[in-house]
Image (cartoon, rainbow, N blue to C red):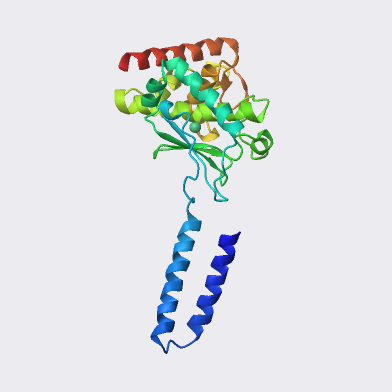
Amino acid sequence: MIKRLSIRTLALLLVLISTVPATSGRVEAQRGALVAAANAATVQNAAPAGPVELDATYAAYGFLFEQYKGPEYGSFSEHEIAVLGQVIEAYADLVGSPETLSGLVNGPVRVRRDLKRVVSYTQAGQVIGLGRGAFDLAVTAEANYYAWGAESGDELAQIVFGHEVAHRWIDTVRREAEMDWGDAYGETIWRGERPSTGTWAANAEAGANAEEEAVTNLALYVLSKGYRWTFLRDAPATENRQVWIDGWALDLIAFTNEIQ
Ligand SMILES: [Zn+2]
């Protein structure tokens, strides 16, 4: 709030000064200094103010939680970091060690709250952004995004975060071993409840995407959820299909162990 007031004051001064003919060098110099100050303040406000407090608890696992002061990027509470930390530890258990996970996600991955967005995302610049819907079932439902069967905000956040971690895992394997486990998922697991309901490509327009389903199901597998998710239906997969999904996850884990 203080920052906003000071920018307004500066802007007002600029308007006043610019309407006065610049007859003296002193006024010119003053105006230049004000322009510079206003520009600096604007730049600072446009971007995140920068990490103010870094929780490095999960640095060994390849994750850095970032805390921002700005209104667009919020901060994690201690509770939220603990909730997400359980996901990180579950992945590390699965792949063998914190260091292995760090290599697998090509860490350090910066984890931040991104209140501008509803949904969460992974960026090539090694950022996992958690939108404001990540910890909020009501916001997610309102925005018409999948809640993946979660029954609480914490559970939803774990699936959401696990989904983004899985994206990084599959990206790394694709880049380093030239093997695409998103494609592998699409080839071995049909879309919907039955093979007869169509191919992935035929349903692409309706939002079917093999990799998106794959990473969600990998997260559910890692989190030991007793269900696996079916694309286009915010519902658990049938038992038969789950066997195929678990087979895919086990194959991915075995392949990853081999290339390490
Ligand atoms: Zn995704």
Question: Residue 80 vs residue 142: left or right?
Answer: left
Q: Name the residue nearer the viewer: 8 or 203.
A: 8
The percent position of residue 14, horizontal first and vertical second, equals: 50, 76
Q: Is residue 98 left or right of residue 148?
A: left
Q: Residue at x 48, y 81 (%)?
A: 18
State which quarter of the image contains the N terminus.
Answer: bottom right
Q: Where is residue 198 shown, x and y percent of the image?
A: 52, 23
Where 149 falls versus 46 (above or below)? above
| Res 256 visible | yes
**Total residue callouts:** 0
**Image spot of residue 9 (x, y percent):** 56, 71
Residue in the image at 50% along x and 81% along y: 17
Classify 68 as above or below 4: above
Position of residue 13 relative to residue 98, above or below, is below
- Would residue 200 be seen by someone viewing this image from the given angle? no
The image position of residue 228, as x and y in percent, is: 57, 18
**Residue at 47% of width from left, 67% of height from top?**
38
Residue at 59% of width from left, 10% of height from top? 239
**Which quadrant is the C terminus positioned in?**
top left
